[in-house]
Amino acid sequence: MQRFDLKRFRIDRELTQKELAELLMCKQNYISNIENGIKPISKEKLDILQSKFGDISKYYSDISPKQNTVLKEVTPEDFMFAGADAFSRQVVKMMNDKLIAPYGMLVEKDKEIERLNRLIGRLQNEIEELKKGSAQTGNPAECANAV
């Protein structure tokens, strides 16, 4: 069984995940999933790489299904920190994508909206007062005839 080493290919070509995603017309997390072994790279994506960069055969490696992998011993504390780190990265990504906002920012925006609503109210009152004033002094000729 063979696996394409997308990460090594990308690094050798001095491409970022974002740049490679644009080239392959996919999302950056798809590239990350391939590099982390979560998803295999599709034949269509390999065809795109082949057509853009020529021979890519040196980035294939054999993977034995019986390959023994030694796992690092993980303490509950390590596991907790890894989860907290992943959560933090996800929250930052959601803020960057404007899906969520920090609470403090929401409070500031609410205050700004309240201030602007008060200003709008004052301006509407001023407009009404000006309309009343101009209605009272509507036709100067009529005012002169009334005297």
Image: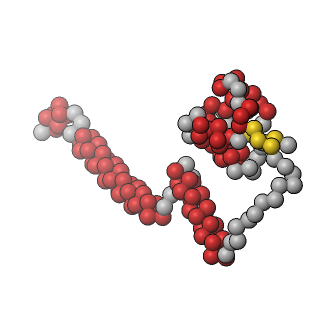
Q: Residue at x 64, y 41 (%)?
A: 8
Please identify the residue farthest to the right as the structure is shown.
66
Q: Nearer the viewer, residue 68 or 79?
A: 68
Please identify the residue farthest to the bottom as the structure is shown.
76
Q: Give residue 28's position: percent from left, percent from top.
A: 63, 43
Q: Nearer the viewer, residue 137 or 15?
A: 15
Q: Give residue 110's position: percent from left, percent from top.
A: 43, 60
Residue 58 to residue 81: above or below: above
Q: Give residue 86's position: percent from left, percent from top.
A: 61, 61
The color scheme shown is secondary structure
Dividing the image into 4 quarters, which one contains the C terminus? top left
Residue 30 visible from this viewpoint: no
Would you say 29 lies left or right of 94 here?
A: right
Q: Quadrant of residue 136?
A: top left
Dividing the image into 4 quarters, which one contains the N terminus? top right
Q: Give residue 64's position: percent from left, percent from top.
A: 85, 49
Residue 5 to residue 107: above or below: above
Q: Nearer the viewer, residue 52 or 71?
A: 71
Q: Quadrant of residue 74?
A: bottom right
Total numbered labels: 0
Q: Residue at x 35, y 57 (%)?
A: 115
Q: Nearer the viewer, residue 85 or 127?
A: 85
Residue 76 to residue 16: above or below: below
Q: Residue at x 81, y 47 (%)?
A: 63
Residue 117 visible from this viewpoint: yes
Q: Residue at x 48, y 61 (%)?
A: 102
Would you say 141 lies left or right of 123 here?
A: left
